[in-house]
Amino acid sequence: MNLAIEHVTKKYGNHHAIDDISCEFSNGVYGILGANGSGKTTLMRMLATVTTPTAGIIRVNGKNILSLGDDYRDMIGYLPQHIGLYKNFTADKFLHYIAALKGLSKKEAALKIEELLDLVNLMDVRKKKVGTFSGGMKQRIGIAQALLNDPKILIVDEPTAGLDPKERIRFRNLLSSISGERIVLLSTHIVSDIEFIAKEVLILKNGRLLHKRNPQELLHEIAGKVWLVTTAESEIPRYQDMFKVGNIVRSESRVELRIISDDRPSLAAILTTPNLEDLYLYFFEEDFDAGPVKV
Ligand SMILES: Nc1ncnc2c1ncn2[C@@H]1O[C@H](COP(=O)(O)OP(=O)(O)O)[C@@H](O)[C@H]1O
Ligand SMILES: [Mg+2]
């Protein structure tokens, strides 16, 4: 399976929600990381054919997805950022309803729904109304509906928003477990959602694709730029004015600041190992000193 985005742009009026993006995907999990407004939902809606590009083409195995029409839609599963669940439907009835919309026969649907309720761990609540579900349960039934047609391309838009840490881990493991023979595209602004499961991370900023690389390669980008500085509490504002400051750890009378900076922020600063949170700060926190983000 090959999915290719070729010079895709989406404009709303004069505003470029997506600005000339090109990239390719093969089987595996891809994390699409970007702050609010960076264009994640717009990109996913185009991939799901809910909206069309202003310019550019999206191809699957070489064919334009728009000319494939329903043949393409049969290949994809989509969990939108804000999914409308039918609150008064039971989990079972909801999945049967979506299965019918997707054109599964009753027999196929019954088999598939058994399998999916088991996969997403909702078997024991299948007769309960989805309106009574927790956030995590709603997202899991959302994934189940997206998987009904056994899609080769699964598109999930900020699925972990509003989930507690335990639910997030469970959801992450679920996505990882189903990623074998398909392309999974997962958008998020939470680094830990994708740190361990994504084979590649795409960094979107203002509708542009800054990077598409595996997490380890991305970390090289900020090697030698993450520092620990031990200082006094009263010095924090001064550092915050001059540098990007991440974690602040307090102990007794001193504080330890995690600072992302091209240059050594103070004589006593020591280099430390970068993580993806640092990378996020590097790309998305506003600079005071370093000017625009390097591409
Ligand atoms: N239907 C729309 N009409 C006008 N502007 C839109 C529309 N959808 C998105 N945008 C704008 O496009 C940009 C990207 O939005 P979006 O794709 O929702 O980003 P994200 O999902 O990363 O938060 C934002 O500036 C947003 O305001
Ligand atoms: Mg969004």
Image: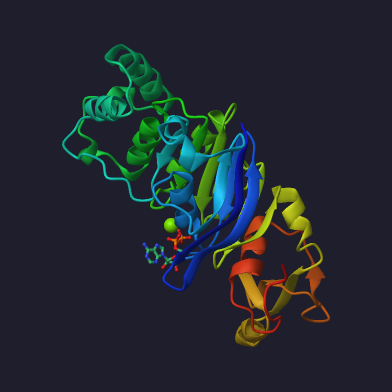
Asked whether 172 or 63 is in front, the reply is 63
What residue occupies the far top of the structure in this picture?
107
- How far from the left and from the top, in percent, is residue 76? 46, 34
Q: Is residue 286 left or right of residue 51?
A: right
- Please tell me which residue is depicted at 63% across the width and 36% down the height of the picture: 2
- What colour-coding does the image apply? rainbow
Asked whether 181 or 167 is in front, the reply is 181
Q: Reply above or below: 73 against 286.
A: above
Quarter of the image holding residue 20?
bottom right
Q: Is residue 89 left or right of residue 73?
A: left
Is residue 177 in view? yes
Q: Is residue 81 left or right of residue 179?
A: left
Is residue 192 in view? no
Quarter of the image holding residue 258?
bottom right
- How far from the left and from the top, in percent, is residue 169? 50, 41
What residue occupies the far front of the structure in this picture?
67
Q: Reply above or below: 118 against 18.
A: above
Asked whether 85 or 195 is in front, the reply is 85
Question: Exactly how many numbered labels are in the figure?
Answer: 0
- Please tell me which residue is depicted at 40% across the width and 18% down the height of the picture: 115
Which quadrant, please, contains the N terminus? top right
- How far from the left and from the top, in percent, is residue 45? 43, 50
- How far from the left and from the top, in percent, is residue 114? 35, 17
Which quadrant, please, contains the C terminus? bottom right
What residue occupies the far left of the structure in this picture?
88
Quarter of the image holding residue 87?
top left
Regarding ligand 2, which quadrant of the image does it lie in?
Answer: bottom left
Q: Reply above or below: 173 against 164.
A: above
Q: Is residue 192 left or right of residue 227?
A: left
